[in-house]
Image: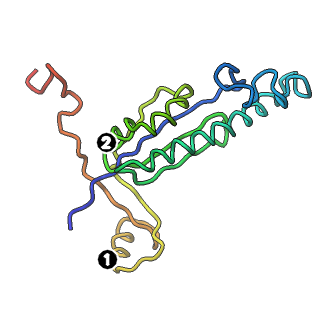
Amino acid sequence: MPDPAPPVLAQIIFRLPATPDPTVDGPALGGPGSEGSGLDGPGVDGSGLAESVSDVAGAGFAVSARAALAALARCAGFRSGRLARALDAPGTWLLTTEWDGPGAWRRALSSFDVRCTLTPLLVHAVDAPGSFEVLAEVTALAEVTASAEVAASAAAGLAPGRSSRVYRSDRAADADVAAPGLGLDR
């Protein structure tokens, strides 16, 4: 049986501002003048105001990001997805999805439902590389059934109950220089 194609990971990093912009986030997300924004009560001196406003904005962001993740999950080629929040920077979020390949990811971004739910969030996106080809993985197995898997895990130096896989890259050997007018003949 041939090995399955390596998955493609797509990641979008979002950074929410410490103080939301009322023109973007609106009063419901803790903008100035909204009830409970903290601007007229304790913390006006800045001690904790950013965290409380960021938490309120983050709650609205999380709801919207979950809707975008659900829209992505309905697309062909979707394998899995996660929404994560940085532990040491609560205003930083990560949306990670796994796809059958780069084509599936690109087609998903063209979906009307995805464009309607994800595009409003992209105002907070950080400009960084967004898709990655998986070349190796280690996973925890619920139960190990084949002795060959146990032997392969032990040979790889892994604890029992874990497996590893190495993928061959699908990129062409000249992928870094392949473009119109460029090639290996230069």
Q: Is mark 2 on a helix, strand or loop?
A: helix
Front position in the image: 66 or 136: 66
Q: How crowded is mark 2: few (under 14 residues within 10 Å), some or many (20 or more)?
A: some
Image quarter in which the N terminus is found: bottom left
Name the residue that disc number 2 marks: 102
Q: Is residue 118 above or below residue 163?
A: above
Q: In this view, does 77 lie to the left or right of 174?
A: right
Residue type of the residue flagged with mark 2: Pro
| Colour approach in the figure | rainbow
Front position in the image: 118 or 146: 118
Residue in the picture at 63% in, 29% down: 16
Residue in the picture at 34% in, 75% down: 151
Instruction: Calculate the distance from the C-alpha at mark 2 to the C-alpha at mark 1.
Output: 32 Å
Location of residue 58 in the rendering, given as x and y in whole percent from the top left corner: 68, 37
Location of residue 122 in the rendering, given as x and y in whole percent from the top left corner: 52, 29
The extreme front residue here reads: 112
Residue in the picture at 31% in, 46% down: 101
Name the residue that disc number 1 marks: 148
Q: Residues within 10 Å of mark 1 (few under 14, many from 20)?
A: few
